[in-house]
Image (cartoon, rainbow, N blue to C red):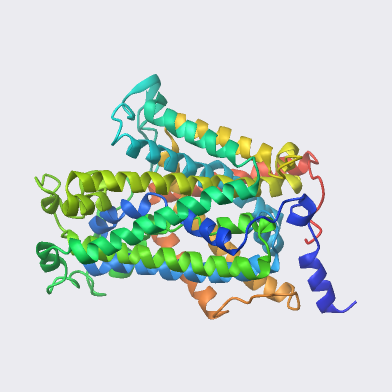
């Protein structure tokens, strides 16, 4: 048998977690796959995190620069993943790529972190955001309106980390979050086409909302005060490579000064989180029609459209509000982008243009965005735990499909239960602070797997090859490593907990292996 035939068989042969052997329904076309990419990316982050980025970088140019760095890295990552997705269109996506490229341990550590923190923590936070903005219309829905308050966990220091400082219990806001998670989880049992229909409708709605914000900002929002403060000779302030920027190290009172490249890396915590989850479409690869074409194309189209809108939204923010402001400011303009009320920059922009009605319109838009985002996250995340179970690395029942609808019903329910626990525990906020570091680590490892598979399986069928290989993927690895090192140095309260969560998966993996839970070895290993 020739080397090329062996390589093709090793990739194409259905593993226990591949779609065809699992009995999934291929119900996602190019449109649904693309809306899954876009809908999973757009949550509430784009409407909020620019305030924190502005306080960090203190420069209009660097505010846009932070988003441009995120856009470059995300698109390069998506183009690189496209090759792996077309090569191995199996349920589980990134989990499968890590398993095949680097070994089952790395695949498990990714799936473990995804279940424990990344996917479920994000779902919980987005669900709570939905309740928070519904509270704009119904004030009884509030984090302070307790139905059952168990306890307040005080903050405590452990090395560079600050843990605790959360309320455990059920408020009207967290109750609504739980109801949203349960509703969407149950809906997604009834076939991938049902989930895709919801995703299409809500993604189109929120893309329209973002495009509307940009359009309104261009024609109605430009403010002379903001333009003078942000652009007329002030755009490049503090943006030179020799500029020094203050950074608070961890949870201490220590402040050090760093260069422009370093401050841009620190600022990526917010922008990268807001642009994350683009890889979720790979989790559903087994349900995508013509995956060798539609997966790479959906990744490129979805990330490209969303990140263009993200950058344009920030241009509008700078056109409507001054970057600088005061936390004690009496008006929206006085507070600026840095100190927008509760960091709701997009809401401040709309209120500046349309008054109170603008704030209500933005609250409604964020609710739509949160609902659609969570549908995509719930739909896709369950496919990873299904793939792990088929490989014997999670509870076997999780690897079963609904006999009629061919969806991973047990996986959906397990994900739902853990997410609801996070909603009630109040820990989701801290967990989200920890995930950017861990997410970047696994993105780096997956793109390393791209290089490894080019060497291990040089003749494997690759319907799509990563654009710019090997230069662009290598640049991504270097940039992501730089960001992770900077975050370890200057934001240890966020990075070390994330690393600990990943490492806790090591003994769990070996316990699974020792107990002989493996249902079948992946035939493509």
Q: Nearer the viewer, residue 350 or 326?
A: 350
Left or right: residue 444 compared with residue 230: right
User: What residue is rendered at 57% in x and 32% in y?
Assistant: 417
Q: Nearer the viewer, residue 429 or 189?
A: 189
User: Does 123 sit above or below residue 143?
Assistant: below
Quarter in which the C terminus is drawn: bottom right
User: Does 309 sit above or below residue 421?
Assistant: below
Residue 259 lies in what quarter of the image? bottom left
User: What residue is rendered at 46% in x and 54% in y?
Assistant: 203
Residue 258 in view in this figure: no
Quarter in which the N terminus is drawn: bottom right
Residue 513 in view in this figure: yes
Give the image location of residue 108, x and y in percent.
Answer: 66, 50
User: What residue is rendered at 63% in x and 77% in y?
Assistant: 465
User: Does 167 sit above or below residue 307?
Assistant: above
Left or right: residue 132 compared with residue 431: left
Give the image location of residue 257, x and y in percent.
Answer: 24, 62
Q: Nearer the viewer, residue 112 or 245?
A: 112
Left or right: residue 378 compared with residue 255: right
Name the outermost residue toward the right. Answer: 1
Left or right: residue 282 compared with residue 367: right
């Amino acid at each position: 048998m020739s080397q090329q035939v062996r390589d093709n068989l090793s990739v194409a042969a259905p593993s226990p977690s591949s779609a065809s052997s699992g009995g999934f329904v291929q119900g996602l076309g190019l449109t649904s796959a693309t809306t899954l990419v876009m809908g999973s990316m757009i949550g509430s982050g784009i409407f909020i995190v620019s305030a924190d980025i502005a306080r960090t970088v203190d420069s209009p140019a660097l505010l846009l620069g932070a988003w441009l760095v995120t856009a470059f890295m995300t698109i390069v990552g998506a183009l690189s993943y496209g090759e792996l997705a077309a090569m191995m269109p199996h349920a589980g996506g990134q989990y499968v790529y890590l398993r095949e490229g680097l070994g089952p341990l790395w695949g498990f550590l990714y799936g473990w972190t995804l279940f424990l923190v990344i996917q479920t923590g994000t779902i919980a936070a987005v669900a709570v955001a939905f309740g928070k903005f519904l509270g704009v219309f119904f004030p009884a829905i509030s984090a302070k309106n307790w139905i059952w308050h168990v306890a307040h966990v005080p903050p405590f220091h452990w090395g560079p980390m600050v843990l605790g400082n959360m309320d455990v219990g059920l408020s009207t806001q967290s109750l609504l979050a739980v109801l949203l998670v349960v509703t969407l989880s149950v809906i997604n049992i009834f076939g991938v086409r049902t989930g895709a229909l919801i995703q299409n409708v809500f993604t189109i709605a929120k893309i329209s909302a973002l495009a509307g914000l940009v359009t309104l900002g261009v024609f109605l929002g430009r403010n002379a005060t903001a333009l003078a403060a942000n652009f007329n000779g002030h755009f490049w302030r503090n943006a030179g490579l020799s500029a020094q920027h203050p950074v608070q190290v961890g949870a201490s009172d220590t402040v050090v000064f760093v260069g422009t490249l370093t401050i841009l890396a620190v600022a990526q915590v917010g922008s990268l989180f807001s642009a994350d989850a683009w890889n979720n479409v790979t989790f559903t690869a087994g349900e995508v029609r013509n995956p060798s074409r539609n997966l790479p194309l959906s990744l490129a189209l979805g990330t490209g459209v969303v990140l263009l809108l993200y950058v344009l939204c920030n241009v509008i923010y700078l056109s409507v509000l001054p970057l600088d402001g005061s936390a004690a400011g009496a008006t929206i303009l006085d507070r600026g982008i840095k100190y927008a009320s509760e960091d709701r920059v997009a809401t401040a922009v709309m209120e500046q243009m349309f008054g109170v009605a603008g704030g209500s319109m933005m609250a409604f838009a964020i609710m739509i965005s949160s609902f659609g985002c969570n549908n995509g996250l719930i739909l896709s995340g369950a496919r990873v735990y299904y793939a792990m179970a088929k490989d014997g690395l999670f509870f076997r029942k999780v690897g079963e499909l609904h006999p009629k609808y061919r969806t991973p019903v047990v996986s959906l329910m397990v994900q739902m239960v853990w997410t609801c626990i996070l909603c009630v525990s109040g820990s989701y906020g801290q967990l989200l602070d920890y995930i950017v570091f861990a997410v970047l680590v696994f993105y780096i490892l997956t793109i390393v797997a791209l290089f490894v598979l080019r060497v291990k399986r040089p003749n494997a069928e690759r319907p799509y090859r990563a654009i710019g290989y090997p230069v662009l993927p290598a640049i991504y690895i270097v940039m992501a490593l730089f960001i992770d090192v900077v975050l370890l140095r200057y934001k240890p309260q966020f990075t070390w907990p994330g690393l600990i969560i990943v490492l806790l998966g090591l003994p769990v993996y070996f316990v699974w292996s020792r107990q002989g839970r493996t249902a079948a070895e992946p035939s493509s290993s």
